[in-house]
Image: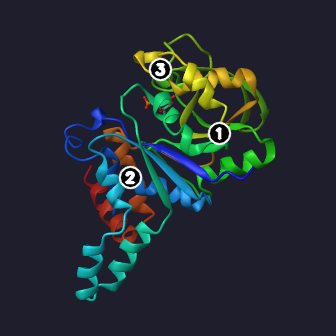
């Protein structure tokens, strides 16, 4: 079955980014020349997905507005003959169809995904977490879709992390299928140190079988008192095959202050018009360190 829809939860409070995220959604913080959420949406679009479902909450309307058509701005830019800018702004609103669903209570990531149940229906779908930016030649989602074509089962993107960081992630245990691909046996959300030998961490890209919705409905609060997607994935992995995939590319945790700075640097160095001058400046800065 063709995968047509992607869910992007953006309801979180963004406490790791306070005070910057006090009055604006953290997803709207800029990386070079566009908000972080636009990179996520562009990855989805580049992977051929047709519909995005944002899971939102109060105070997140700036995200929906960003992807909407702005008649007033369009008119003013046209009057001023700023047609290039006009085209760029219109391009954002024409990227893809967007549906918003409200998560009415902050009960956790699993609950956020569950709220998309009626919009997704009985189709496999993608989930992208807004904090995780991936720089890669082939979009991370596209890499996962290619695996789905091969196995027709759920795929979770993973990367190896230092043992000292495993307690910060969902961790996957499993057997190797081939280089970079594992069949999932067990998943744990933010395991306490010493409780797993695995260092394979879930990053925010999932391709899920719709059976996850029935499981989420039964999932009780787990780590941090929240309904965890990882716990539901553990139940799904018992019913159907699930694959953990070491994606090709570099992932940045843009929801963390240092990760955000690293992302700005990496994206600036790849920017089509700014990278040349930026590299020169960086060399000068490095020489003074
Ligand atoms: C979430 C997931 C976790 C995953 C992480 C990736 O955690 O629950 O399994 O490893 O995203 O970014 P969060 O960082 O939202 O606490």
Q: Which residue is at 67% across, 44% downward? A: 123
Res. 167 in view: yes
Is residue 276 found left or right of 199 in the rendered image? left
Give the x, y percent position of residue 48: 62, 60
Above or below, 79 against 110 in this view is below
- Whole-Å distance between the Cαs marked 2 and 1? 23 Å
Q: Which residue is at 31% across, 45% downward? A: 26
Element carrying mark 3: helix
Out of 90 and 40, give the one closest to the viewer.
90
Res. 273 in view: no
Residue 246 has which mark? 1
Is residue 76 found left or right of 236 in the rendered image? left
Decide which of tag 3 and tag 2 comes sooner along the chain.
2
Where is mark 3, residue-wise? 167
- Whole-Å distance between the Cαs marked 3 and 2? 25 Å
Q: Which residue is at 29% across, 53% downward? A: 62
**Mark 2 CB within 8 Å of ligand 1:** no
Q: Which residue is at 34% across, 79% downward? A: 86
Element carrying mark 1: strand
Q: Residue furthest front?
A: 118
Give the x, y percent position of residue 189: 52, 21
Q: Nearer the viewer, mark 2 or mark 1?
A: 2
Counting labels gives: 3
**Mark 1 CB within 8 Å of ligand 1:** no
């Amino acid at each position: 079955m063709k995968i047509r829809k992607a869910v992007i939860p953006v309801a979180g409070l963004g406490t790791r980014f306070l005070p910057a995220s006090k009055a604006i959604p953290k997803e709207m913080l800029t990386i070079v020349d566009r908000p972080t959420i636009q990179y996520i949406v562009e990855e989805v679009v580049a992977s051929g997905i047709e519909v995005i479902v944002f899971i939102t909450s109060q105070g997140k309307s700036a995200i929906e507005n960003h992807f909407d058509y702005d008649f007033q701005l369009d008119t003013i830019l046209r009057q001023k003959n700023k047609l290039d800018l006009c085209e760029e702004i219109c391009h954002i609103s024409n990227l893809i169809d967007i549906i918003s669903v409200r998560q009415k209570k902050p009960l956790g990531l699993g609950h956020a995904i569950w709220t998309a149940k009626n919009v997704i229906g009985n189709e496999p779908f993608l989930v992208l977490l807004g904090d995780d930016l991936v720089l890669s030649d082939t979009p991370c989602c596209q890499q996962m879709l290619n695996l789905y074509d091969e196995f027709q089962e759920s795929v979770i993107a993973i990367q190896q992390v230092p043992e000292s960081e495993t307690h910060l992630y969902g961790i996957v245990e499993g057997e190797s299928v081939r280089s970079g691909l594992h069949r999932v046996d067990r998943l744990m959300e933010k395991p306490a140190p010493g409780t797993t030998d695995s260092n394979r961490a879930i990053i925010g890209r999932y391709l899920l079988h719709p059976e996850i919705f029935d499981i989420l409905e039964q999932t009780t609060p787990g780590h941090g008192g929240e309904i965890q997607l990882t716990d539901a994935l553990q139940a799904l992995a018992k019913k159907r095959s699930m694959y953990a995939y070491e994606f090709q590319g570099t992932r940045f945790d843009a929801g963390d202050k240092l990760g955000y700075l690293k992302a700005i640097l990496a994206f600036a160095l790849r920017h089509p018009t700014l990278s040349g001058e930026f590299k020169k400046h960086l060399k000068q800065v490095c020489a003074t360190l």
